[in-house]
Image (spheres, rainbow, N blue to C red):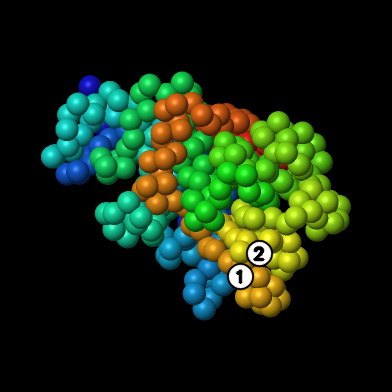
């Protein structure tokens, strides 16, 4: 399989608004030893695309400082963590039989080689990503999904959103028969958490609002709490015996209001801060009830392997809200920021 020398890409040239996303023609990256070159079939958008572009992650001791996910970024940067496509070429030391395989890329950059390694970087942030026709990735981070019944759009929707949701579920030790609360349930991670928790056999109480409620219920939620109303009152009514695990991408005031809703030994797992990063709660509700607050950033290699097993079997079906061409990346990010959709927004080169 031959590849061109030049490709189309969209690069962030600095921190800022959508205007910093600029189409460009750049050299096709050459896979280094141990890497593969993937022709991008689809790339999905995530909130991290917005926050990385804006520099909204802050730094330890400087929460309002402009920063990428794990520190300063090198610009220009090709964004895009979530890639599905086909292996076009391999670098030195990589099995040539990978060429032609349909794959999903694990976008995490880990702090080690073991199955429980922690993510400390992200494709599209600490290295160039999939807002392009081609992207390189370590060979051991591409997963063969050639036999999956899912489309490229659906496969691209999996890595960050479903990987993050499965990481939350695993770290929160959610078990069959338990009651789980999912905040932000109409977003990418939230909807993934609803589907994955339902597949695990949990009773799902989800938080959403307005016209999105029906879609969240259709995705598998047993009960949907309207966040425009009395949230804690609705949760108590939906889960009168309490919540075993909360999968929370909202944080803010919800953490302090929600901790008293946990059962004895309950786990509150946080993987986002859509409602604010400055959190306060009554610590007595924590230690007197043996509760836990657990931070969860993305997934481990083991979690991602479990997710790819589900993808090959077609046991998860991501909802695709909209599809954009790569050249309209800025418009796609603006649509994502409006949060009027349910499911995932994807782009095709």
Frontmost residue, 240 versus 9? 240
Q: Bin the neighbour count of mark 1 within 10 Å (Cα to Cα): few under 14, some 14-19, many 20 and up.
A: some
Which structural element holds mark 2?
Answer: strand
Q: Residue at x 38, y 58 (%)?
A: 118
Q: Bin the neighbour count of mark 2 within 10 Å (Cα to Cα): few under 14, some 14-19, many 20 and up.
A: some
Q: Are marks 2 and 1 in contact (CB under 8 Å)?
A: yes
Q: Image check: 204 left or right of 12? A: right
Q: Which mark is residue 235?
A: none
Which structural element holds mark 1?
Answer: loop
Can residue 280 be spotted in the picture? no
Residue 136 horizontal/vertical position (percent): 30, 40
Q: Image check: 152 left or right of 226? A: left
Q: Marks 2 and 1, how far apart in space?
A: 6 Å
Q: Judge whether 141 appears above or below 273 on screen.
A: above
Determine the image quadrant of residue 269. bottom right
Q: Which residue is drawn at 36% across and 23% down?
A: 146
Q: Which residue lies most toward the left here? A: 93
Residue 48 horizontal/vertical position (percent): 53, 51
Quadrant of image for the C terminus: top left
Can residue 38 be spotted in the picture? yes
Q: Mark 2 points at which residue?
A: 264
Residue 44 horizontal/vertical position (percent): 51, 37
Q: Judge whether 58 appears above or below 47 on screen.
A: below
Q: Judge whether 79 appears above or below 8 on screen.
A: below
Frontmost residue, 3 versus 245? 245
Q: Mark 1 points at which residue?
A: 290
Q: Which residue is drawn at 61% across and 70% down?
A: 290
């Amino acid at each position: 399989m031959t590849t061109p020398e030049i490709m189309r890409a969209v690069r962030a040239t600095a921190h800022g608004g959508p205007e910093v996303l600029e189409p460009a023609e750049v050299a096709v990256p050459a896979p280094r030893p141990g890497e593969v070159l993937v022709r991008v079939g689809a790339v999905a958008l995530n909130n991290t695309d917005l926050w990385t572009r804006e520099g909204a992650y802050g730094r330890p001791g400087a929460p309002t400082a402009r920063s990428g996910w794990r520190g300063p970024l090198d610009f220009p940067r090709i964004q895009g963590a979530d890639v599905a496509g086909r292996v076009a070429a391999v670098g030195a030391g990589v099995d040539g039989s990978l060429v032609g395989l349909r794959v999903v890329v694990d976008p995490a950059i880990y702090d080690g080689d073991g199955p429980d390694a922690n993510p400390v970087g992200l494709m599209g942030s600490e290295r160039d990503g999939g807002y392009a026709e081609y992207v390189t990735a370590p060979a051991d981070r591409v997963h063969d999904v050639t036999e999956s019944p899912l489309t490229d759009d659906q496969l691209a929707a999996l890595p960050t959103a479903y990987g993050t949701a499965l990481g939350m579920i695993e770290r929160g030790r959610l078990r069959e028969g338990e009651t789980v609360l999912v905040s932000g349930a109409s977003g990418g991670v939230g909807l993934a958490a609803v589907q994955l928790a339902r597949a695990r056999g949990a009773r799902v109480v989800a938080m959403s609002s307005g016209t999105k409620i029906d879609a969240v219920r259709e995705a598998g939620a047993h009960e949907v709490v309207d966040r425009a109303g009395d949230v804690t009152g609705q949760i108590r009514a939906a889960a009168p015996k309490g919540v075993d695990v909360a999968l929370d991408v909202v944080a803010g005031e919800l953490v302090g209001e929600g901790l008293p809703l946990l059962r004895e030994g309950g786990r509150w797992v946080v993987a986002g801060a859509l409602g604010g990063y400055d959190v306060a709660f009554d610590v007595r509700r924590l230690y007197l009830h043996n509760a836990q607050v657990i931070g969860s950033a993305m997934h481990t290699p083991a979690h991602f392997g479990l997710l790819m097993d589900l993808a090959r079997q077609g046991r998860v079906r991501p909802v695709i809200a909209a599809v954009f061409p790569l050249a309209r990346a800025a418009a796609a990010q603006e649509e994502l920021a409006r949060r009027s959709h349910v499911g995932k927004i994807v782009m095709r080169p």
